[in-house]
Amino acid sequence: MTRLSKEQIYLFEQAIYLPLLLIVLERDTSIIKDSGIKLKEPYLTLIDQVMRKIQLQLKQIKADMKQQQMKLHKLKQDESFTMYAFLFNGYEEHHNYFNPRIRNKVNELLMQYILRMEESSISEK
């Protein structure tokens, strides 16, 4: 049984997923730059805009966590699971995340961010 509220769990999980999403986008940027794609600029611009949006959201998440005296520590990782320590209100909870679940959630978030960027660019026209 967790002592965390849904909002606190959301903050901790965003603090897990968003940095991973930035790593994926940084790797994708270097792959696109080194690829034989003829028109790289649209892809690189989209990735850059998505990364900026994620960085702003991550900054807000970290500020909210600091205000609530919440800390996240990655404890250990193996081929199947990653364990995190959630520190809050004088308590410490350990949470195991199935690595494919993390990957799927990062993929889902990436789709959401890209679709939002597309929607906002369409509405600007």
Image (cartoon, rainbow, N blue to C red):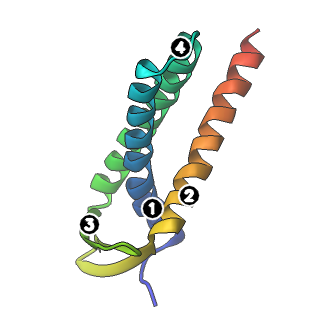
**CA distance for labels 1 and 2:** 10 Å
| Label 4 Cα crowd, 10 Å radius (few <14 / some 14-19 / many 20+) | some
Question: Which mark sits nearer the N-terminus, 3 or 1?
Answer: 1
Residue hosting label 3: 74
Where is mark 4, residue-wise?
Answer: 40
Q: Nearer the viewer, residue 25 or 53?
A: 25
- Distance from Cα at disc 2 to Cα at disc 3: 17 Å
**Circle 2 — which element?**
helix
The first of marks 3 and 4 along the sequence is 4
- N-term-proximal mark, 2 vs 3: 3
- Please provide percent x and percent y for residue 101: 53, 67
Looking at this view, name the residue that lies furthest to the bottom.
Answer: 1
Between label 3 and label 1, give the one nearer the viewer. 3
Name above or below for residue 105 compared with residue 99: above
Identify which amino acid the numbered label 1 is placed on. Answer: Glu
Q: Identity of the amino acid at label 3? A: Lys
Contact between marks 3 and 1 (CB within 8 A): the answer is no
Give the CA distance from mark 3 to mark 1: 12 Å
Relative side of 111 to 91, left or right: right
Q: Secondary structure at mark 3?
A: strand
Could you tell me which secondary element the residue under label 4 belongs to? loop
| Label 2 crowd bin: few (<14), some (14–19), many (20+), radius 10 Å | some
Residue hosting label 1: 13
On residue 105, which mark appears? 2
The amino acid on which the numbered mark 4 sits, given as a three-letter code, is Lys
